[in-house]
Image (cartoon, helix red, strand yellow):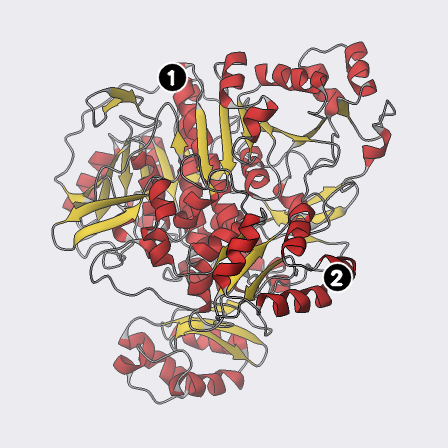
Amino acid sequence: MLQASRVSDGRWRLSAFGGLRVLDFTQGVAGPMASMLLGDFAAEVVKIEPPAGDRGRDHPGYHAFNRNKQVRTLDLETEAGLTEAKALIALADVAVFDHAPGVLERLGLDADTLTAAHPQLIHVWMPPYGTSGVWSQLPPHHSLLTAVSGVAFRQGAYADQPIHLILPLVWYGQGVMGAAAISAALLERSRSGLGQAVTVSGLHGVAEVTGPVRTLAGPPLPRGQPLGAMPSYRLYPCSDGKWLFLGTLFANFYVRAIEAMGLTDYFEAMVMDPLLARQTLASVFATRPRDEWIEILKGAGVPCAPVGPREPWFAGTAIAQGDLRRTFDHPMLGPVSIPNTPIKLSATPGAVRGLARPADSPAWTPTAAPGPVNGGHNAPLYGIRVLDMGTVIAGAHAGDVLANLGADVIKVEPMDGDPFRSDGGAFLAYNRGKRGLGLNLKEPAALALFHDMVRHADVVLDNYRYGVRKRLGIDYAALKAINPRIISCSINAYGDIGDRVALPGFDPLLQAEGGMMAAQGGADEPVLHTIPVNDVATSAMVCFGIVSALNVRERTGEGQEVLTSLMAQSLTFQMAEVVDYAGRPANDVGSEDCLGVRALHRFYHCKDGWVAIVCETPEAAGAVGAVMGVVLDPAAALAAPRDGALAEALEQAFAGRARADVLTALLSAGVPAAPGLRGIEAFDSEWLWENRLFDLWRHPRVGDIISVRSYADFSRSPGGFERPTPDIGEHTAELLREIGLSDARIEELFAIGAVFEPGHVAGQTAKSARPGDGGVALMTQ
C-alpha cells in the first residue's frame, strides 16, 4: 500500500495511501467526499458512475468531491456492467457504496457476499439515512435527514419551528467519518490480514456533527439563539449596518473587550445581568462602523470577526496564505478553484493533483496479500494510546471519536480542568470513553512525567494556540526526540503559515468570515450555527489524519506531525459551496428562521407536528397538489418561492391535517417526505433506536444519559465506548502505575502537586475532587 510519489521538483516522497485501490460507487456528497480524502493522500480512486452520471454531476461540488479520481461509466443494471464491476472489486482494496437498503443484496454487491468472496476487501456502505426501516428508503435529501433525526430543531431559532440548514452539514460529517473509518479498517487489516464490512450511515453523520445527548435526571438543554445566547459570544450590528461576531468565550478575553470599549465602570453590573450586558454592548457597537470596531478589538487582543460572504473569503488573502486553494483548468468551464487538502501530514503530505477525468477500466492485476491472516477481532484502534490535551469541542471531540474506535484515550487536564468541563450533556458526550490524568505542567516534575507518558504513547493530541506547545516543551520536535514513533497532532485557529497563525480563534469567528452565517441568514440578519460547524469538522478531520498517520507508521515504524486548523475546516463543511468558476450556478441562501429554499422543498406545520417535503420532478409536485387539495402547475411549482402564494396555500392545507395521515398519503403518492422531529421526539423515535443511533449509559454521579452509540460500525472488529466520562484526574494513580512508577514515587508526585486525583489527600490535591472547579463561567450552550 505505501508507495512513493514524485513531487514537483523531481524528488520522491512517501504517501499515506499510495498503491491503495479504491472503487467508489457512490454519488452526491458523503461517499465521494470519503474517497476524495483517500485520493488526496495518493490512493488510486476509480469512480464508477451510471450512464446518467452522478446525481450531483451538475453541482459545482462535483469538481471538489471527485478530484484526483478516474471516472468509469458502468451500468450495474446490465449483466456486462455488473460483471465488470465485480471483476474490479476482486482486485480492489476498498469498495464504497451508498445504495438504499436492499439494493446491494439484489445486485450481489452486499457486504456478506463480497467479503466472503474476497476476505481482504474492505466493503464500505454509506447509506444517506439509516440501514433499516421506512425512512431509510427515502431518496437522498439532506433536509429529510435533518427532519427525521431531530437535527432541524437543533439549530437556534426565534420561533418554535424546525430550521432548514443551507449547508448539508450532516452529509459532510458522514463523508469525513467515512474516510476515517476506512483508514481505521485499513490499520486493522494490516494487523489481522482481513478486510471487513464498514458502515457509516447518515445517522453516523448525525452522531458526529450534532452529538445529540440527554441527561435523564435534568431538564432538556435550552435551544440556542440565532445571534448567540451569551452577550460575550454573540453577533452585533454596527453603525454602518455591518455585523461582527464578538468571540470572547473565556473571561480574560471578555475583560479585554469591556476595557477596549470603555465599559469598565459597568463591568460588574453587566456580569450580574446578561440582558443588560447584551443591551449595553449592542448600543455601544451601534456607535461606530464595523471596521473601526474590528481594529479596536483586535488591537486589544480580543477575538472577533466580521460577517461576510464566502466568495471573498475563499478568494482572499488568508486562504491564499494558508495554502488552502487550488485552481485547475476544466475543458469546458475554464479555471475551476477548489479547496486544497484540509489536513497536513508532515512526512506523507497530501496533494490535489487535478480534477476528475474519464478513464477506461483500470488495468489492475492481482496484488500480494496485505499481511498474515490472524483473524483478530479487536477494535480498529485497539492498543493505540492517545494523550488527549484537547479542550472545549474541537480537540476533545476528536479524542472521543478515537476512543469510540477503540483507542485508549487519556484526557490530560490541569487543576482547573478543561474550561468546557461541567456536568452538562455536551461535555459528558464529547469526553466519553476516556480516562482522566490530572497533571500540573507548571511543575517541572510534571513535564518530566508527561515525557515519560509520551514514551508509552502512540499519539499526542492538542488544540493549543500556535507556539504554546513549544513554550511548554511538548512540540513535535521535543516529543519525537523522546519517542520517534509518536504522532503529534495539533489544532489551532488559523494554521501554521500566514499572518494570522498566533491569533486566538473560535468556531463562530470562522463561521462569520467564512460566509456560513451570511448564507444561513440570507437577506436577513446573519445566523450563528448553534451546531459548532467548524469544531466538529475539525474533530472528524483530525481523526482521519491521525489514523492515516498510524497507517504510515505501521509500515515505516516512524511517527510524524499532523496539523489542521479551524480556518481549513471553514472550507471543509462548505466544500461544494466555495467551488468557483465563471458562470457557476448560485448557491441556495437562507433567511431568518428558514423553513426551506422553495415552496416544494421546505417544512410545513400540521395540526400535531412538522413535515418536510422535497419535490424535484413535476410528478412529485403534482402528487403534492393532489394529496393536499391545492391547485398548482406541476412544472412551475418546482420553482415557486418558499414564502409565496403556493407556500401560503400549502401552509393552510397542512395546518388542518394530522401529521401521520399526511405522511402516509404523501409517501403513498411517491412524494419524498418525513416528519420534522423535535429533539425530545427524536430521543423517543423507534426508527432512530432501530438504527442504533443512541446508547443508554450511566455516569456514576450524573446518572442515566442517552447519547450517540458509535461514529462507524465494523462487522468483525467493532469499537464502542468502554467507559463513562472521567472526572478530573480520575485515573491518575492507575495510569502512573501502568508506566511502571512505584507507589512511593506516585505519592511523591501527589505531594508536590505535580499530579492530582479526586479524593487523594496529598499536598494540594484534595480540592480537585469535583469536576468543574475553576471552570470558566463564560460558556455557550
Q: Within 10 Å of the Cα at label 2, are there few (<14), some (14-19), or many (20+) other Cα atoms?
A: few
Is there CB contact under 8 Å for labels 2 and 1? Answer: no
Q: Nearer the viewer, mark 2 or mark 1?
A: 2
Residue at 28% in and 85% down: 633
Quadrant the C terminus occupies: bottom right
Dot 2 corresponds to which residue? 266
Q: Is residue 27 above or below residue 147?
A: above
- Residue 647 shows in this picture: yes
For numbered disc 1, what is the local secondary structure?
A: helix
* Nearest to the observer: residue 466 or residue 453: 466
Q: Is residue 638 above or below residue 191?
A: below
Q: Position of residue 427 (x, y in %)?
A: 66, 45
Q: Within 10 Å of the Cα at label 1, are there few (<14), some (14-19), or many (20+) other Cα atoms?
A: few
Dot 1 corresponds to which residue? 555
Q: Position of residue 580 (x, y in %)?
A: 26, 55
Quadrant the N terminus occupies: top left
